Image (cartoon, rainbow, N blue to C red):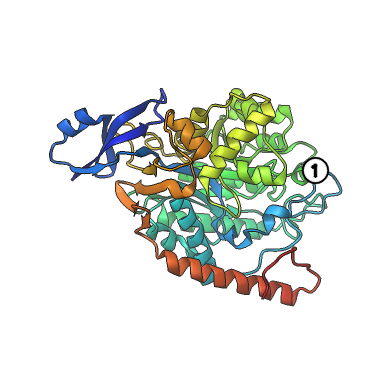
Amino acid sequence: MTIVIHDAAVVTVDENDSVIYGGAVAITGDRIAAVGASRDILARFPQAERIDAAGKAVMPGFANVHTHLELTLARGVYEDLSPPHKPPFDGGLAPIPVPKLTDDERRVMCELGALEALRSGTTAILEDSTRIDTYAEAMAATGLRFLLCERTWDRTKASIGDPRPFETDRAGGERRLGQIEALHAKWHGRENGRIRIGLAAWAPDMCSPELLRDTRKLQDRLDLVATIHLNQIWGEVAAVQAHRGRLPTEFLDDVGFLSDKLIAAHCRCMDPREEAILGRSRAAVAFNSAIAARRGLSPRIADLETGGCLIAMGTDNMAEDMIEVVRTGLFMERVRREDGRNPTPEQALRWATVNGYRAMGVADGGALVAGNKADLIMIELRRAHLAPVLRVASDVVHQAQPHDVSDVMVDGRWLMRASKVLTMDEPRIVAQAQRIATDAWRRLFATRPDLTPPAGFALA
Protein backbone atom coordinates (compact mmCIF):
# COMPACT_ATOMS: atom_id res chain seq x y z
CA MET A 1 0.00 0.00 0.00
CA THR A 2 1.26 3.46 -0.90
CA ILE A 3 0.51 6.49 1.29
CA VAL A 4 0.57 10.02 -0.12
CA ILE A 5 0.87 12.90 2.33
CA HIS A 6 -0.21 15.91 0.27
CA ASP A 7 -0.70 19.69 0.33
CA ALA A 8 2.05 20.16 2.92
CA ALA A 9 5.09 22.39 3.21
CA VAL A 10 7.72 19.73 2.49
CA VAL A 11 11.14 20.46 4.00
CA THR A 12 13.27 17.89 2.19
CA VAL A 13 16.77 18.59 3.60
CA ASP A 14 18.03 17.28 0.25
CA GLU A 15 21.37 18.44 -1.12
CA ASN A 16 19.77 21.73 -2.23
CA ASP A 17 17.69 22.27 0.95
CA SER A 18 14.61 22.23 -1.27
CA VAL A 19 11.28 23.30 0.21
CA ILE A 20 8.08 22.43 -1.66
CA TYR A 21 5.01 24.43 -0.66
CA GLY A 22 1.87 22.53 -1.63
CA GLY A 23 4.08 19.45 -1.81
CA ALA A 24 3.56 15.74 -1.32
CA VAL A 25 5.52 12.72 -0.14
CA ALA A 26 4.63 9.20 -1.33
CA ILE A 27 5.60 6.25 0.89
CA THR A 28 5.59 2.63 -0.22
CA GLY A 29 6.55 0.06 2.39
CA ASP A 30 9.46 1.40 4.40
CA ARG A 31 10.70 3.76 1.66
CA ILE A 32 9.95 7.15 0.22
CA ALA A 33 8.66 6.50 -3.28
CA ALA A 34 8.48 10.08 -4.54
CA VAL A 35 8.55 13.73 -3.47
CA GLY A 36 7.14 16.63 -5.47
CA ALA A 37 4.19 18.89 -6.13
CA SER A 38 0.93 17.48 -4.78
CA ARG A 39 -0.81 17.49 -8.16
CA ASP A 40 1.99 15.43 -9.73
CA ILE A 41 2.36 12.93 -6.89
CA LEU A 42 -1.39 12.35 -6.52
CA ALA A 43 -1.67 11.74 -10.27
CA ARG A 44 1.22 9.31 -10.17
CA PHE A 45 -0.28 7.27 -7.29
CA PRO A 46 -4.06 7.38 -7.88
CA GLN A 47 -4.80 4.32 -5.70
CA ALA A 48 -2.78 5.52 -2.71
CA GLU A 49 -4.17 6.25 0.71
CA ARG A 50 -4.38 10.03 0.90
CA ILE A 51 -3.47 12.07 3.97
CA ASP A 52 -4.37 15.73 3.75
CA ALA A 53 -1.55 17.70 5.40
CA ALA A 54 -2.76 21.21 4.63
CA GLY A 55 -1.42 23.57 7.27
CA LYS A 56 1.38 21.20 8.19
CA ALA A 57 5.08 20.81 7.48
CA VAL A 58 6.51 17.41 6.56
CA MET A 59 10.21 16.96 7.21
CA PRO A 60 12.75 14.29 8.15
CA GLY A 61 12.73 13.13 11.73
CA PHE A 62 15.62 14.15 13.96
CA ALA A 63 18.62 11.92 14.62
CA ASN A 64 19.88 12.16 18.20
CA VAL A 65 23.46 10.90 18.01
CA HIS A 66 24.28 11.08 21.72
CA THR A 67 22.06 10.35 24.68
CA HIS A 68 21.76 8.35 27.89
CA LEU A 69 18.06 7.62 28.28
CA GLU A 70 18.28 6.47 31.90
CA LEU A 71 19.40 9.93 33.00
CA THR A 72 15.88 11.26 32.71
CA LEU A 73 16.16 10.22 36.37
CA ALA A 74 18.37 13.27 37.03
CA ARG A 75 16.10 15.79 35.29
CA GLY A 76 16.05 19.10 37.15
CA VAL A 77 19.09 18.07 39.19
CA TYR A 78 22.25 17.60 37.13
CA GLU A 79 21.58 20.58 34.84
CA ASP A 80 22.62 22.84 37.73
CA LEU A 81 25.49 20.80 39.21
CA SER A 82 28.17 21.00 36.52
CA PRO A 83 31.81 20.33 37.46
CA PRO A 84 34.31 23.21 37.69
CA HIS A 85 36.04 24.55 34.58
CA LYS A 86 39.24 25.35 36.47
CA PRO A 87 41.46 23.31 38.82
CA PRO A 88 41.43 21.66 41.23
CA PHE A 89 39.63 18.76 39.52
CA ASP A 90 38.53 15.73 41.50
CA GLY A 91 36.45 13.82 38.97
CA GLY A 92 32.80 13.25 38.19
CA LEU A 93 30.13 15.22 36.37
CA ALA A 94 28.16 16.15 39.51
CA PRO A 95 28.72 16.16 43.29
CA ILE A 96 25.65 13.95 43.79
CA PRO A 97 25.62 10.37 42.43
CA VAL A 98 22.76 8.97 40.38
CA PRO A 99 20.52 6.77 42.57
CA LYS A 100 20.74 3.06 41.85
CA LEU A 101 17.81 1.43 40.08
CA THR A 102 16.66 -2.11 39.49
CA ASP A 103 16.61 -3.33 35.90
CA ASP A 104 12.84 -2.85 35.77
CA GLU A 105 13.06 0.70 37.13
CA ARG A 106 15.84 1.54 34.72
CA ARG A 107 13.80 0.26 31.79
CA VAL A 108 10.93 2.59 32.69
CA MET A 109 13.22 5.62 32.86
CA CYS A 110 14.57 4.70 29.42
CA GLU A 111 11.00 4.35 28.14
CA LEU A 112 10.31 7.85 29.46
CA GLY A 113 13.27 9.19 27.51
CA ALA A 114 12.16 7.41 24.35
CA LEU A 115 8.64 8.74 24.81
CA GLU A 116 9.87 12.32 25.06
CA ALA A 117 12.11 11.76 22.04
CA LEU A 118 9.21 10.47 19.95
CA ARG A 119 6.95 13.34 20.97
CA SER A 120 9.70 15.81 20.05
CA GLY A 121 10.06 14.46 16.51
CA THR A 122 13.08 12.21 16.95
CA THR A 123 13.13 9.13 14.74
CA ALA A 124 16.67 7.80 15.32
CA ILE A 125 18.63 7.54 18.59
CA LEU A 126 22.18 6.60 19.51
CA GLU A 127 22.03 5.28 23.06
CA ASP A 128 25.38 5.13 24.92
CA SER A 129 25.06 3.07 28.08
CA THR A 130 25.73 -0.19 29.91
CA ARG A 131 23.69 -3.39 30.28
CA ILE A 132 21.62 -2.34 27.29
CA ASP A 133 20.35 -5.89 26.86
CA THR A 134 18.17 -5.40 29.95
CA TYR A 135 16.02 -2.82 28.13
CA ALA A 136 16.70 -3.38 24.42
CA GLU A 137 13.37 -5.18 23.97
CA ALA A 138 11.47 -2.18 25.32
CA MET A 139 13.38 0.18 23.05
CA ALA A 140 12.67 -1.97 19.99
CA ALA A 141 8.97 -1.93 20.89
CA THR A 142 8.84 1.88 20.64
CA GLY A 143 9.23 1.66 16.86
CA LEU A 144 12.09 4.17 16.88
CA ARG A 145 15.34 3.56 15.03
CA PHE A 146 18.19 2.77 17.43
CA LEU A 147 21.96 2.48 17.36
CA LEU A 148 22.62 0.84 20.73
CA CYS A 149 26.20 1.41 21.88
CA GLU A 150 27.29 -0.72 24.83
CA ARG A 151 30.11 0.96 26.74
CA THR A 152 33.53 -0.28 27.81
CA TRP A 153 36.26 1.14 30.06
CA ASP A 154 39.02 -0.26 32.26
CA ARG A 155 39.85 2.48 34.73
CA THR A 156 38.82 1.68 38.28
CA LYS A 157 38.25 3.74 41.44
CA ALA A 158 37.73 6.96 39.45
CA SER A 159 35.38 8.79 37.11
CA ILE A 160 35.75 11.25 34.23
CA GLY A 161 37.93 14.24 34.99
CA ASP A 162 40.04 12.77 37.80
CA PRO A 163 43.79 13.47 37.32
CA ARG A 164 44.88 11.07 40.08
CA PRO A 165 46.93 8.01 39.00
CA PHE A 166 45.25 5.66 36.53
CA GLU A 167 44.44 2.25 38.03
CA THR A 168 43.63 -0.41 35.44
CA ASP A 169 41.00 -3.13 35.68
CA ARG A 170 42.03 -5.09 32.61
CA ALA A 171 39.60 -7.94 33.26
CA GLY A 172 36.72 -5.49 33.55
CA GLY A 173 37.52 -3.93 30.19
CA GLU A 174 37.71 -7.32 28.50
CA ARG A 175 34.45 -8.42 30.09
CA ARG A 176 32.72 -5.34 28.74
CA LEU A 177 34.08 -6.00 25.26
CA GLY A 178 32.49 -9.42 25.54
CA GLN A 179 29.17 -7.80 26.43
CA ILE A 180 29.39 -5.70 23.27
CA GLU A 181 29.89 -8.84 21.18
CA ALA A 182 26.98 -10.58 22.91
CA LEU A 183 24.65 -7.62 22.32
CA HIS A 184 25.73 -7.51 18.68
CA ALA A 185 25.06 -11.22 18.20
CA LYS A 186 21.57 -10.91 19.68
CA TRP A 187 20.32 -7.58 18.33
CA HIS A 188 22.27 -6.28 15.34
CA GLY A 189 20.01 -5.99 12.28
CA ARG A 190 16.79 -6.87 14.09
CA GLU A 191 13.44 -5.28 13.16
CA ASN A 192 14.22 -4.87 9.46
CA GLY A 193 17.55 -3.30 10.37
CA ARG A 194 15.89 -0.70 12.58
CA ILE A 195 17.92 -1.91 15.58
CA ARG A 196 21.68 -1.82 15.11
CA ILE A 197 24.57 -2.20 17.51
CA GLY A 198 27.58 0.06 17.92
CA LEU A 199 30.20 0.32 20.62
CA ALA A 200 31.29 3.02 23.03
CA ALA A 201 34.56 3.69 24.77
CA TRP A 202 33.66 5.77 27.80
CA ALA A 203 36.26 8.58 27.57
CA PRO A 204 40.01 9.00 26.95
CA ASP A 205 40.72 9.29 30.68
CA MET A 206 38.67 6.15 31.45
CA CYS A 207 40.35 3.82 28.94
CA SER A 208 43.90 2.49 28.77
CA PRO A 209 45.80 2.53 25.46
CA GLU A 210 45.51 -1.26 25.34
CA LEU A 211 41.73 -1.20 25.75
CA LEU A 212 41.31 1.48 23.09
CA ARG A 213 43.34 -0.60 20.64
CA ASP A 214 41.32 -3.72 21.45
CA THR A 215 38.07 -1.76 21.08
CA ARG A 216 39.16 -0.48 17.68
CA LYS A 217 39.99 -4.05 16.61
CA LEU A 218 36.52 -5.18 17.66
CA GLN A 219 34.98 -2.25 15.80
CA ASP A 220 36.81 -3.20 12.62
CA ARG A 221 36.03 -6.91 12.95
CA LEU A 222 32.29 -6.35 13.44
CA ASP A 223 32.17 -3.27 11.17
CA LEU A 224 30.53 -1.03 13.76
CA VAL A 225 30.07 2.66 14.43
CA ALA A 226 31.98 3.73 17.55
CA THR A 227 31.44 6.63 19.91
CA ILE A 228 33.37 8.23 22.75
CA HIS A 229 33.04 11.22 25.09
CA LEU A 230 35.84 13.53 23.98
CA ASN A 231 37.03 16.80 25.55
CA GLN A 232 33.80 16.89 27.52
CA ILE A 233 35.07 18.87 30.52
CA TRP A 234 38.33 20.55 31.44
CA GLY A 235 38.96 17.95 34.13
CA GLU A 236 39.15 15.29 31.41
CA VAL A 237 41.77 17.30 29.54
CA ALA A 238 43.82 17.66 32.73
CA ALA A 239 43.49 13.94 33.49
CA VAL A 240 44.69 12.80 30.06
CA GLN A 241 47.59 15.22 30.21
CA ALA A 242 48.50 13.85 33.64
CA HIS A 243 48.21 10.21 32.54
CA ARG A 244 49.44 10.31 28.93
CA GLY A 245 51.38 13.56 28.60
CA ARG A 246 49.26 14.79 25.70
CA LEU A 247 45.85 16.18 24.85
CA PRO A 248 42.86 13.81 24.60
CA THR A 249 42.54 13.91 20.81
CA GLU A 250 46.30 13.48 20.40
CA PHE A 251 46.09 10.42 22.66
CA LEU A 252 43.26 8.87 20.62
CA ASP A 253 45.15 9.58 17.41
CA ASP A 254 48.31 7.95 18.76
CA VAL A 255 46.50 4.70 19.64
CA GLY A 256 44.64 4.60 16.30
CA PHE A 257 41.13 5.11 17.67
CA LEU A 258 40.07 7.96 15.39
CA SER A 259 38.22 7.16 12.16
CA ASP A 260 35.39 8.27 9.90
CA LYS A 261 33.18 5.75 11.73
CA LEU A 262 33.62 7.49 15.07
CA ILE A 263 31.16 9.88 16.73
CA ALA A 264 33.03 12.11 19.17
CA ALA A 265 30.60 13.52 21.71
CA HIS A 266 31.00 17.10 22.96
CA CYS A 267 34.46 18.36 21.84
CA ARG A 268 33.90 21.44 24.01
CA CYS A 269 37.35 21.83 25.58
CA MET A 270 39.63 21.54 22.55
CA ASP A 271 42.91 23.06 21.52
CA PRO A 272 42.99 24.06 17.81
CA ARG A 273 45.58 21.30 17.27
CA GLU A 274 42.99 18.76 18.36
CA GLU A 275 40.32 20.17 16.08
CA ALA A 276 42.72 19.77 13.15
CA ILE A 277 43.55 16.17 14.11
CA LEU A 278 39.89 15.23 14.50
CA GLY A 279 39.02 16.91 11.21
CA ARG A 280 41.67 14.96 9.32
CA SER A 281 40.15 11.71 10.60
CA ARG A 282 36.73 12.76 9.20
CA ALA A 283 35.09 11.78 12.48
CA ALA A 284 31.60 13.01 13.32
CA VAL A 285 31.02 15.39 16.23
CA ALA A 286 27.91 15.18 18.42
CA PHE A 287 27.10 18.83 19.07
CA ASN A 288 25.13 18.46 22.30
CA SER A 289 24.15 22.09 22.44
CA ALA A 290 21.53 22.16 25.19
CA ILE A 291 23.68 20.42 27.80
CA ALA A 292 26.66 22.46 26.60
CA ALA A 293 24.75 25.66 27.27
CA ARG A 294 23.77 24.40 30.71
CA ARG A 295 27.40 23.63 31.48
CA GLY A 296 28.57 27.02 30.21
CA LEU A 297 30.79 25.51 27.49
CA SER A 298 30.62 25.43 23.72
CA PRO A 299 32.58 23.66 20.97
CA ARG A 300 33.94 25.65 18.03
CA ILE A 301 31.58 24.10 15.51
CA ALA A 302 32.66 26.24 12.55
CA ASP A 303 36.31 25.26 13.07
CA LEU A 304 35.49 21.57 13.47
CA GLU A 305 33.29 21.56 10.37
CA THR A 306 35.81 23.49 8.27
CA GLY A 307 38.51 21.09 9.43
CA GLY A 308 36.63 18.08 8.06
CA CYS A 309 34.35 16.85 10.85
CA LEU A 310 30.75 15.87 10.16
CA ILE A 311 28.55 17.86 12.54
CA ALA A 312 25.56 16.05 14.03
CA MET A 313 23.50 16.78 17.14
CA GLY A 314 22.48 15.11 20.38
CA THR A 315 20.69 15.79 23.65
CA ASP A 316 23.02 14.00 26.11
CA ASN A 317 21.56 14.03 29.64
CA MET A 318 18.19 14.69 31.26
CA ALA A 319 16.25 15.78 28.14
CA GLU A 320 15.39 14.26 24.76
CA ASP A 321 14.00 17.35 23.03
CA MET A 322 15.82 17.74 19.71
CA ILE A 323 13.82 20.85 18.80
CA GLU A 324 15.45 22.55 21.78
CA VAL A 325 18.84 21.18 20.70
CA VAL A 326 18.58 22.56 17.16
CA ARG A 327 17.53 26.02 18.30
CA THR A 328 20.10 26.17 21.11
CA GLY A 329 22.84 25.05 18.75
CA LEU A 330 21.97 27.74 16.25
CA PHE A 331 21.93 30.41 18.96
CA MET A 332 25.13 29.27 20.68
CA GLU A 333 27.12 29.13 17.50
CA ARG A 334 25.88 32.54 16.34
CA VAL A 335 26.88 34.05 19.68
CA ARG A 336 30.26 32.33 19.58
CA ARG A 337 30.91 33.51 16.01
CA GLU A 338 29.43 36.96 16.72
CA ASP A 339 27.46 36.45 13.51
CA GLY A 340 23.71 37.03 13.44
CA ARG A 341 23.24 35.19 10.14
CA ASN A 342 25.36 32.07 10.41
CA PRO A 343 24.83 29.25 10.88
CA THR A 344 21.57 29.31 8.95
CA PRO A 345 18.45 27.42 10.07
CA GLU A 346 18.94 25.14 7.07
CA GLN A 347 22.44 24.24 8.26
CA ALA A 348 21.19 23.49 11.77
CA LEU A 349 18.44 21.24 10.38
CA ARG A 350 21.02 19.40 8.31
CA TRP A 351 23.16 18.77 11.38
CA ALA A 352 20.14 17.34 13.21
CA THR A 353 18.76 15.16 10.40
CA VAL A 354 20.73 13.90 7.42
CA ASN A 355 24.14 14.39 9.08
CA GLY A 356 22.97 12.48 12.14
CA TYR A 357 21.70 9.58 10.05
CA ARG A 358 24.97 9.51 8.14
CA ALA A 359 27.03 9.55 11.35
CA MET A 360 24.97 6.61 12.65
CA GLY A 361 25.76 4.66 9.49
CA VAL A 362 22.35 5.08 7.84
CA ALA A 363 23.23 6.53 4.46
CA ASP A 364 19.66 6.24 3.16
CA GLY A 365 17.96 8.33 5.81
CA GLY A 366 17.53 11.82 7.20
CA ALA A 367 16.32 13.49 4.00
CA LEU A 368 13.01 13.30 2.13
CA VAL A 369 14.25 11.97 -1.20
CA ALA A 370 13.06 9.01 -3.24
CA GLY A 371 14.63 5.75 -2.12
CA ASN A 372 15.37 6.85 1.42
CA LYS A 373 13.92 5.29 4.53
CA ALA A 374 10.46 6.60 5.34
CA ASP A 375 11.40 8.27 8.62
CA LEU A 376 9.51 11.56 8.83
CA ILE A 377 7.51 13.88 11.03
CA MET A 378 4.61 16.28 10.55
CA ILE A 379 4.44 19.63 12.31
CA GLU A 380 1.24 21.60 12.83
CA LEU A 381 1.88 25.12 11.54
CA ARG A 382 -1.48 26.65 12.39
CA ARG A 383 -0.28 27.96 15.72
CA ALA A 384 -0.06 31.48 17.07
CA HIS A 385 3.71 31.15 17.55
CA LEU A 386 4.31 29.78 14.01
CA ALA A 387 1.95 31.86 11.85
CA PRO A 388 2.49 33.46 9.43
CA VAL A 389 4.49 30.75 7.69
CA LEU A 390 6.68 32.54 5.19
CA ARG A 391 9.93 30.58 5.39
CA VAL A 392 9.08 27.25 6.88
CA ALA A 393 12.56 25.90 7.72
CA SER A 394 13.44 29.07 9.61
CA ASP A 395 10.01 29.12 11.23
CA VAL A 396 10.43 25.60 12.60
CA VAL A 397 13.99 26.14 13.86
CA HIS A 398 13.31 29.49 15.50
CA GLN A 399 9.77 29.04 16.77
CA ALA A 400 8.53 25.43 16.92
CA GLN A 401 7.81 23.57 20.16
CA PRO A 402 7.66 19.79 20.74
CA HIS A 403 3.87 19.84 21.05
CA ASP A 404 3.70 21.08 17.45
CA VAL A 405 4.87 17.63 16.29
CA SER A 406 1.62 15.88 15.43
CA ASP A 407 2.75 12.74 13.57
CA VAL A 408 5.85 10.54 13.52
CA MET A 409 6.69 7.76 11.07
CA VAL A 410 9.64 5.34 11.11
CA ASP A 411 10.22 2.70 8.44
CA GLY A 412 6.86 3.61 6.91
CA ARG A 413 5.00 2.87 10.15
CA TRP A 414 3.11 5.49 12.13
CA LEU A 415 4.36 5.77 15.72
CA MET A 416 2.28 8.84 16.48
CA ARG A 417 -0.86 10.07 14.70
CA ALA A 418 -2.76 13.25 15.48
CA SER A 419 -0.60 13.72 18.59
CA LYS A 420 -1.45 10.28 19.99
CA VAL A 421 1.48 7.92 20.63
CA LEU A 422 0.58 4.52 19.19
CA THR A 423 3.49 2.34 20.31
CA MET A 424 3.87 3.23 23.99
CA ASP A 425 1.55 3.37 27.02
CA GLU A 426 2.16 7.04 27.80
CA PRO A 427 0.08 7.37 31.03
CA ARG A 428 1.64 4.22 32.50
CA ILE A 429 5.21 5.31 31.67
CA VAL A 430 4.83 8.84 33.04
CA ALA A 431 3.19 7.67 36.27
CA GLN A 432 5.70 4.89 36.89
CA ALA A 433 8.68 7.13 36.11
CA GLN A 434 7.50 9.74 38.62
CA ARG A 435 7.12 7.12 41.34
CA ILE A 436 10.44 5.45 40.57
CA ALA A 437 12.39 8.71 40.54
CA THR A 438 10.82 10.03 43.74
CA ASP A 439 11.51 6.76 45.58
CA ALA A 440 15.05 6.46 44.23
CA TRP A 441 16.12 9.97 45.23
CA ARG A 442 14.47 9.59 48.63
CA ARG A 443 16.43 6.35 49.21
CA LEU A 444 19.68 7.99 48.18
CA PHE A 445 19.40 10.96 50.52
CA ALA A 446 18.14 8.75 53.37
CA THR A 447 21.21 6.50 53.14
CA ARG A 448 23.69 9.30 52.44
CA PRO A 449 23.33 11.99 55.12
CA ASP A 450 26.56 13.55 53.85
CA LEU A 451 24.72 14.65 50.69
CA THR A 452 22.70 17.87 50.65
CA PRO A 453 19.62 17.87 48.41
CA PRO A 454 19.56 20.79 45.96
CA ALA A 455 17.33 23.73 46.81
CA GLY A 456 13.65 23.05 46.14
CA PHE A 457 14.06 19.28 45.94
CA ALA A 458 10.79 17.32 46.28
CA LEU A 459 11.37 14.71 48.98
CA ALA A 460 7.92 14.65 50.58
Q: Is residue 402 above or below residue 421?
A: above
Residue 406 position, x and y percent, is 38, 49
Determine the image quadrant of residue 390: top left
Q: Is residue 293 above or below residue 270?
A: below
The residue furthest left is 47
Residue drawn 71% across the image and 63% down it: 97
Closest to the observer, 432 or 229: 432
* Number of numbered callouts drawn: 1
Residue 147 place in picture, x, y as percent: 46, 49
Above or below, comparing residue 209 to residue 334 in the picture: below
Question: 5 or 225, which is in the foreground?
Answer: 5
Instruction: Report the residue marked by disc 1.
Output: 238
**Mark 1, secondary structure of its residue:** helix
Residue reaching furthest to the right = 88
Q: Quadrant of the C terminus?
A: bottom right
Picture quarter containing residue 262?
top right
- Using the rendered image of the protein, determine whether residue 122 is visible from the camera's viewpoint: no
**Image check: 49 left or right of 59?**
left
Image coordinates for residue 48, horizontal then vertical, percent: 17, 41
Badge 1 amino acid: Ala
Quarter-of-image position of residue 391? top left
Q: Which quadrant would the N terminus be assigned to in this image?
A: top left
Residue for point 72% across, 51% down: 160
Residue located at (58% from left, 47% from top): 215
Q: Residues within 10 Å of mark 1 (few under 14, many from 20)?
A: many
Q: Position of residue 358 (x, y in %)?
A: 45, 35
Q: Is residue 306 visible?
A: yes
